Structure formats: C-alpha cells, structure tokens
Image: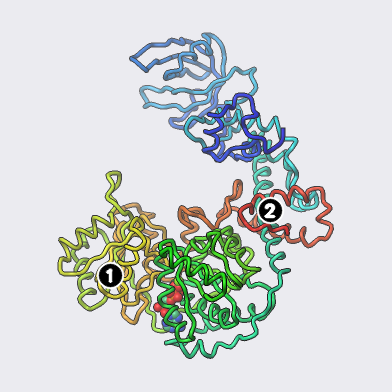
Amino acid sequence: MDLYSPVTVLPGIGPSRAKQLANLGIETLYDLVADFPRTYEDRTKFVSINQMELGVPACFEAWVIRGPQTAHIRKGLDLTKLTVADNTGRLNLVFFNQPYVADQLRYGETYIFYGTVEGDYTRFQMVNPVHEQPDQPPVLTRRIMPVYNLTAGINNKLLSKCIGQAMDACVQELPELLPLAVRQQYQLCDCRMAYQTIHNPLSFEALENAKKRLIFEEFFLFSAGLELMRSRRKQDTVAPYEDLDLQFFHDALPFHLTGAQEKAICEIAADFGKGTPMNRLLQGDVGSGKTMVAAAAAYLCVKNGRQVAFMAPTEILAEQHCQSLSKLFAAFGMDCALLTGSTSAPEKRHIKAGLLDGSISFVIGTHALLTEDVQFQDLSLVIADEQHRFGVAQRAALSQKGKSPHLLVMSATPIPRTLALIVYGDLDVSILDELPPGRQTVDTFLVGESMRARINAFIRKHAEAGNQVYVVCPAVEESELDSLKSAEVWAETLQRVVFPDLRVGLLHGKLKAAEKERVMGQFSNHELDVLVATTVIEVGVDVPNATLMVIENADRFGLSQLHQLRGRVGRGPDKSFCVLFTNNKNQDTIGRLKAFCKTNDGFKIAEADLAIRGPGDFFGSRQHGLPQFKAASLTLDLEVLKEAREAAETALADPNYVNDPTFPAMQDRIRNLFREDSNIFN
Ligand code: ADP
Ligand code: MG
C-alpha cells in the first residue's frame, strides 16, 4: 500500500465514507496521517470522586453499585442510569439513547471513566461518560487524547480509528524529509516518531518534540521551495532595457514624485538594466502613490518596445487604473487597452489580436488576462496590484505568458514583515514610506447609535460643501439572522428618508459589472453625493473629492480592512474624516477600535490585526497568497521559521545535498507544495 493510495483501500471505508472524508480534504492515506489533531485532551490524570469539580472533565476508576437500568422516557428518548463508587464517594451516571451501555457496564465490576460532572450542589451527575475496562488497552481513557477537526457523519472516535488504520498501513512508507545533519543540529526527532506521537502522544514532552519537528519540516520545505524558485529565476536571462530615461515621464506628471517614489522607480529601472528578470514587491500604505511607480515601470517597458500587463483584482480598479493611466500615457503617444470579464466580445477579439501581433503594448485587466487564449508577442513586464489577493499560482500563470517577464507586485495592505517573508519570500522589496505632500491624517471617531442624528448632519455638511461621502455597510442584503446594516436597505433609507435632496448611490459586489462601473463612474464624476457601498470599494478606489467615510457595524471589519476603507478619503486637499459606528459593547472590541482611531500607521495596524486575528483572517476569507500550513502557525511559530529557513539555505548551498537520501523525497514534497505554480525544478 503506498502513501497516496485512496482511503478506500482501508477496510470499512467505502465510497460514502470516502466522500465524507473528502469534506475534510482527506483523499489519500497520506492525507489521513497528515491530518494533525486540532488539540488534545489530557485524560491521563486520575481523580477521586470527591475531588471532582463541576464542569471540569475527569478520568477516574470506579465500580458499579447500582443499575444499570434503562427507562424508555418517550419516543426517541431512552435513559440509562447507574451509580458508581470509589473509596471516596458515589456518583450517578446518565446515558442518553445508549441502551447498549446496560450490556457493557455490569453491576459490581470496575471500569475507568472519563467525563464531566454537571449539576448543582444538590444533585451531581455525569452525562454520557466514555468508559473502558482497566485491562483493556487505553483508547478513550488514561491517555492524551487527540481531538480532530470533524465534519458531518465523522466523529472523533471514527476519525481516530481511520487515522490509526492508515498509520498501521503506511507509517513505514513515510519518507524522511530532513537530512540527518539538520535533525541533529536542531534536535529533531525522526519523521515516523513524529507522526506516531502527534496522533498518540505518550507524554506532553514527547508531543512538544513531535510538534516542533513537524513545524520545522513544514517551514524547511517551504523555505527550500522559495529558495529554489528564486535561484531558478536568477538563472534566467533577459535582454536589458537600453533606454532608461524618465525625463518625459517626469515632465508629464501634474506633481513631483515623492522621494520614496523616486527611489522605488530607480530600483525598478536598475532591475530593468540588469539582464535578469525583476522580482519586486512594492509595498506602501494606502495613498502612498504606488500606481505612479507602476506607471513609470510600464512607461519604460513600452518605451523599450516591449509589452506590459497590469493586473488588478477587481473590475472597478482595472477600470480606474485604465482611466487615469490612459490620460497620462496619451501624453507619450502610448495607448492602453482594458480587458476584463465585461469587455465586449468584438473588443476582446481586437485586444487579443493586438497583444498577439504586438500592436498593443500596454494592457490593463483583471483575471481575464489569465485566460489561455490571451497571448502576447513579447510580454516583458507583469504588474499585479493588491498582490495579496492573487496567489503565487496566478502570478505565475501570468508570468508564463512571456519568457521570464519582469514582475512587479504591489500591496497596499501593509503586510507585517514577519508575514511578508512567507508570502513574498522570493521577492525583493521596495517600500513607499512617505505619503505625497499635503496629505493630512484622517481624523477618526468611534460612535454609537446615539450619535446618529449628528453624524447625519455631518454627512449633509460635507455634501453641501461640495465634497462626497462613502457609507460602508457589512452586508449587501437584509438578513434575518443578524442586525447588520445592509447596503441595499440603508441606501434606500438614506435616499428616501434622511437625504431626499441629496444624490445617493448604491454599490456592491452582487451588481452586474456594467452597473458597478456606471455607479462608480457617477461617483467619480460627482454625480453622486453619497455612495453606500460594501467593501467592494475597499481596494484602491480613488476619488480625491471624497472627504468622509462612515463605516456601519465597524466591529465586523478587521483593522487592516478598516484602514483600507479609511484610505479612500484624505486623498485630496480637503480635511477628511472617518466615523466608525458600533453597537458592540465588548471591552476588547471597543479597545481595538479606539486604538484604531488614534493611529494612521498602516504597519502598526497590520501588526495589531495579525496578533488579534491570526494570518488566516488577516487576508480575509480568500487567503490566496498564503500557503496552507498543517502543523505550523504563522503567528506562534516564527522562531522555528527562522531556524528552518537557515537550515534550508545551508542545505541547498551544499553541493552534496543532492546525494542525501532525503533529497528526492524533499523534492517531491516541494513539487506538491507548489503544485499550481511553475515547475520550479526545470
Ligand atoms: P495607492 O498607493 O494607495 O495605490 P494611488 O497610487 O492610488 O495610491 O495614489 C493616491 C493618489 O495620490 C492618487 O490620486 C495619485 O494621483 C496621487 N499621487 C500619487 N503620487 C503623488 C505625488 N507624488 N504627489 C501628489 N499626488 C500624488
Ligand atoms: Mg492602489
């Protein structure tokens, strides 16, 4: 039986069980053994009956002094009762709908139980405890019990059993992935030991060792993969750009670039002159002017007769980039084309033909750029905006449309340095740590419902002064489940009841692309005073005349997301404000939002957000850019990450590594890890 046999090779697992397991992402024997417990229950410590505490699970030995007796209470409810005792006291046990317990537990016999005492001081009882005979091997009691993530139809006992079967079937097949020298240097146990212990720890100390080993392994492989990817890209050669003169570009801009922009552009131009493909992350807080840096890069590319593709995560953003850059590029006699999902078919055909024959040099678009039939004559630069929304895979898919094109990825979510290492481990970094001059900080206030009338008056004041206002709601539609403000209903209320004389628009993700575009266009052209929206406006939207951002149910958003939203205002010359509404009374939540009001520093906010929510939530539900780690936690295990990274770099630098017995398995696993990415080994 090999590691990648389907789970159905195990006795007792048929197609329907396999389907349930697939809901947990488990398809092969390896998936089973690599399904690490979510947590553990300590069932090792025995307590006597008189020492038990209400609500605290306990393991104890006792004999049956009364019962068991089963009573049929009503249809669908059987109750089995018995009383057990040890030298210190007695306890009533109750089992719901487990009549077979009456056969398993016999009067006068001794058993080991594990369960939780419930009730009040007049009446204790334990409901549905698990039990074993003292001479049975410890499975449910007397051990550190692994607790797995479950799904409908699969309980912990069943999953433990499947994993046990898989371990028996293939533990010998588990390949060692870490060279002996690495294991010795970092005191890591071998791989079989680690897997056996993680599913069945004999002590907490052994468990810690096993965990450390598996976390280390995961980070080692990931670091090695990134390192290989980087070194492969370094071997590629491209023709350097000859003309790196940006005088025209500077002259055409309506403003002076900031020092940080200048520096980033210089770094990019230097990369273009080198003859190896650029791999650069441009990181800068909202409003720091990343688009202009991208424009400079695109300008140099087109000027040198090559093609550039600029990928944005939403149609609104692609549209907006195209509008602003078209104007600028027209001054250089350069065109840019827009290709999104809603581009008309003839227009699409036209653009695709132009990209293929080279007559179009600059295309801006969404994921539509990734489709197979988009081909380039000489794609030399790929720019990805708001990169954290794209995975390594999508980045690579676009890159593969050219011969080792230069890559510039931009992120407005200021990713904490620790995480950046993981998400962008293979990139060089330019940072825009300076905002364009004249930007004021956005004053931010946290308010409750009692302030509603005053905030409405504040909205009116901004609108009447000729500025514009965003109102962001957490939901699109009204829901019966929660009392969140819905964009649809709130927009209607504001227009009809509160501001009948103002122009109120509605924008959310469920609208058709053309409709979104129309509304966004209206807002940009100041045909609307108030835009009620969901977080579709979170990313990149740039309307400098907007000076007030009102966020409903602010506690529903992550801090980084709030920061993104707040970044939509304060983009023009006028003083801007952000108002956070919340009904939440939770002290932590209030504290977090108050802290947010006091700082405009995206990096600080991101660090705080990461600490509060963990990296999964940090990137939102999409999580595209993040690798999925099984054992490791990106918040807790960063020390191990550092060691593993060092170890991987040292190993790869050693020319003898390829002869190590662990090398082929490591290579294999990395191929799997980066499966959707370019083949990093050739
Ligand atoms: P982000 O980094 O969030 O993508 P943008 O590129 O959208 O920021 O820039 C925000 C706004 O600042 C835009 O309106 C842009 O035209 C303007 N801007 C960019 N660079 C400068 C500059 N050096 N001086 C003044 N305004 C600038
Ligand atoms: Mg931007």
Mark 2 Cβ inside 8 Å of ligand 2 = no
Q: CA distance from mark 1 to mark 2?
A: 48 Å
**What colour scheme was applied to this rendering of the protein?**
rainbow
Q: Earlier in the sequence, mark 1 or mark 2?
A: 2
Q: Which mark is residue 415?
A: none
Q: Quick one: label 2, few (<14), some, or many (20+) residues within 10 Å? A: many
Query: Which is nearer the eye, 482 or 132?
Result: 482
User: Quick one: quadrant of the N terminus?
Assistant: top right
Residue 310 on image: x %, y %: 51, 70
Q: Quadrant of ligand 1?
A: bottom left
Q: Is residue 236 above or below residue 251?
A: above
Looking at the image, which residue is at 44% across and 83% down? 328
Q: Is residue 418 visible?
A: no
Q: Is residue 449 above or below residue 112?
A: below
Please state which amino acid type lies under the numbered disc 1: Val
Looking at the image, which residue is at 78% across and 48% down? 662
Query: Which is nearer the eye, 117 or 7?
Result: 7
Q: Is residue 391 above or below residue 42?
A: below
Q: Is residue 350 left or right of residue 521?
A: right
User: Quick one: quadrant of the C terminus?
Assistant: bottom right
CB of mark 1 within 8 Å of CB of mark 2? no
Residue 170 on image: x %, y %: 71, 34
Query: Which is nearer the eye, 537 or 354?
Result: 354
Q: Quick one: label 1, few (<14), some, or many (20+) residues within 10 Å? A: many
Q: Which mark is residue 221?
A: 2
Residue 217 on image: x %, y %: 69, 49
Asked which secondary structure carries label 2, the reply is helix
Please state which amino acid type lies under the numbered disc 2: Leu
Q: Is residue 177 above or below residue 367?
A: above
Residue 601 on image: x %, y %: 45, 71
Asked which secondary structure carries label 1, the reply is strand
Q: Which mark is residue 469?
A: 1
